[in-house]
Amino acid sequence: MASHCQTDRPLAIGVSGPAGSGKTTLGRELATALGAPLLDLDSLTTPLLDRLHGPVLAEHWLAPPHGDTIRDARYAALRATAADVAATAGTALLVAPFTAELAGGRAWRELTEALAPAELRIVHLRGTPELFARRRAGRGAARDAHRPADSPPAAPAVPHIAVDAELTPQQQCFRVRRTLGHRVPIDPAATVFHRPFDAVLFDVDGVLVDSTASVLRSWERLADDLDIPPATVAQNHGRPARALLSQLLPPARLTEGMQRIERLEAGDAAAVTEVPGARALLDALPVTRYGLVTSGTPAIARARLGAAGITPPPVLVTADDVHAGKPDPEPYRLAAQRLGVAPERCLVVEDAPAGVAAARAAGCAVIGMLGTVAPGGLAAADVLVDGLDRLIVSVDGAGIRLTPDSG
């Protein structure tokens, strides 16, 4: 990704979260993407402390009575090393739980003062204790045997970038970099930017609302309830839930599965957020000139839109309105029909391969929204963007144009 928001001020990025949250994996992903030195608290201090266990420390260094003293020493080493790296390399990527620092107070002041004049940005991986415990059990690290039991993590009291632990490292890295101002270049020569359209059609999940983590959580809970493999969910993104459940459940249990996943997804909707620029872009469009096309049910779509502060327009096509869902073109053809325009005069914004395929089959032009799948999965789109805040709406007698924001 290129950035149009760089400064000369040194930058320290701290990746935080409980053990098992995936902070080391995300730290490596970010360090590689940014070309920044990686400073992992465990890598810096664990080998030394493990060598001291036995000859110097009778008990493991994570166990009482060493806890507070060892922690202070470990973080002092991390702060000193990070300050040197940020001052010389310009950027340092720190990985640590930062539990005390996230609460503010003395530990936070020590960290910020040690890194000054570097700007400190904290990335915090959030999730449930059950998720983190399951991941720790899967990795089988010896040090985890000495950790106390988890309690529900408190929300950080310091400024931070919240990232869901359920997302893949690539999805997490994308969201962090976007927040830091590292944006994907847009091709201004793309044909879709130089022609008018009669209407714009938006997918909901991944385009208007960032619901990927919510979807994954809901389907994982369903998988536990119904004893189905959760790994298959990622392959179903952008397609109706019925299409997946009909492959996993016997016909007699399909209704039960549909009712259950709708309750789970609607119940988790409060956790979703707006994709950058979604509300502003919709507000700039005449309500009679755009529609929403989702593979979700009406209850799920309205719950997620409401959580993001988006009022559904009159044209909202859901899974209940069509016989064949994406990648079939029926949903987009129906939305165009309800708006009274030809599909060929519609511009679609989609984040999933199934949705892009549906729009293409309907005859629509397509803008691909990054953040859910790798760019290659959206290769059939006319152009790619990483947020709706990168687009400007203009409306005149010829129709609607979306153009890239040159700023």
Image: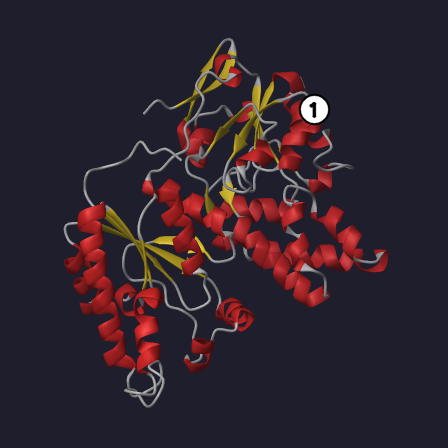
Image coloring type: secondary structure
* Residue 322: quadrant of the picture: top right
At x 56%, y 33%, the residue is 313
How crowded pointer 1 is (Cα within 10 Å; few <14, some 14-19, many 20+) is rated as many
Which residue reaches farthest top? 397
The residue indicated by pointer 1 is 362
Lateral position of residue 222 relative to residue 180, left or right: right
Front residue of 15/233: it is 15
Q: Quadrant of the C terminus?
A: top left
- Disc tally is 1
Depicted 76 relative to depicted 296: above or below: below
**Image location (x, y in percent) of residue 372:** 54, 42
Depicted 211 relative to depicted 183: above or below: below
**Image location (x, y in percent) of residue 138:** 56, 70
Which residue reaches farthest bottom? 58
Front residue of 56/191: it is 56
Lateral position of residue 138 relative to residue 64, left or right: right
At x 53%, y 53%, the residue is 213
Lateral position of residue 121 relative to residue 266, left or right: left
At x 57%, y 34%, the residue is 376
Front residue of 145/302: it is 145
At x 57%, y 21%, the residue is 199
**Image location (x, y in percent) of residue 335:** 66, 28
Q: Secondary structure beneath disc 1?
A: helix
Q: Kindly tell me whether residue 367 is visible in this rendering.
A: yes
Check disc 1 and give the amino acid type. Answer: Ala
Q: Quadrant of the N terminus?
A: top left
**Image location (x, y in percent) of residue 338:** 67, 25
Depicted 193 relative to depicted 214: above or below: above
Q: Kindly tell me whether residue 266 is visible in this rendering.
A: no
